[in-house]
Amino acid sequence: MNNKKICQSCGMPLKKDKNGPAKEKDGSPSEKYCSNCYKNGEFTCPKCTVEDIKNKNKEEMKKRHFPNFMVNMYNKKLPELERWHNNTKKDSQEIIEQ
Ligand SMILES: [Zn+2]
C-alpha cells in the first residue's frame, strides 16, 4: 500500500502536484509532502490541525465536483498520514500491559 506516494499531510498524490515537488531547506525535493503543504523545509500551515486540512480538502474537492462519499473516504485516511499519526500517538499513548 505504500507504493503510491501521497502527501503525508493532505493525502494528495505527489504526482499530481503541479507546483511540486516541495523542497527541503537544502533544496532537495521532499518525498513526503506536496508543495501546498510544505515549502523550504517547513509546513506552509504549521498550526493547521487535521480538521483544518479536512475542510480544505472538502472545499477543493467540492470545486471539482467530487461526490460526498469520495470526500469522506479521502478524509478518513488523513489521520493515518505521517504528519498526523505522530501527533495522535503522543496524545493518546497506549498503555502497554505487562
Ligand atoms: Zn499536501
Image: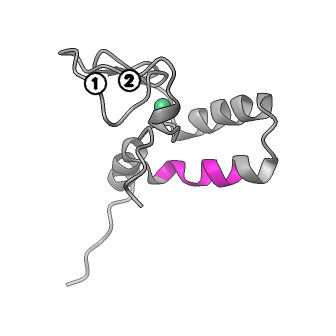
Q: Are marks 1 and 2 in contact (CB under 8 Å)?
A: yes
First in sequence, mark 1 or 2: give its number: 2
* Quarter of the figure with residue 37: top left
* Quarter of the figure with residue 14: top left
Which kind of residue does numbered mark 1 sit on?
A: Pro
Decide: is 9 above or below 90.
above
Q: Which residue is mark 2?
A: 21
| SS category of the residue bearing label 2 | loop
Q: Which residue is mark 1?
A: 29
Tell me where residue 94 appears, x and y as whole percent: 33, 67
Q: Residue at x 42, y 21 (%)?
A: 20
Residue 98 among those drawn in magenta: no
| SS category of the residue bearing label 1 | loop
Which kind of residue does numbered mark 2 sit on?
A: Pro
Residue 76 among those drawn in magenta: yes
- Main SS, magenta residues: helix
Q: Nearer the viewer, residue 23 or 47?
A: 23
Decide: is 69 above or below 37.
below
Residues rendered magenta in the picture: 72-79
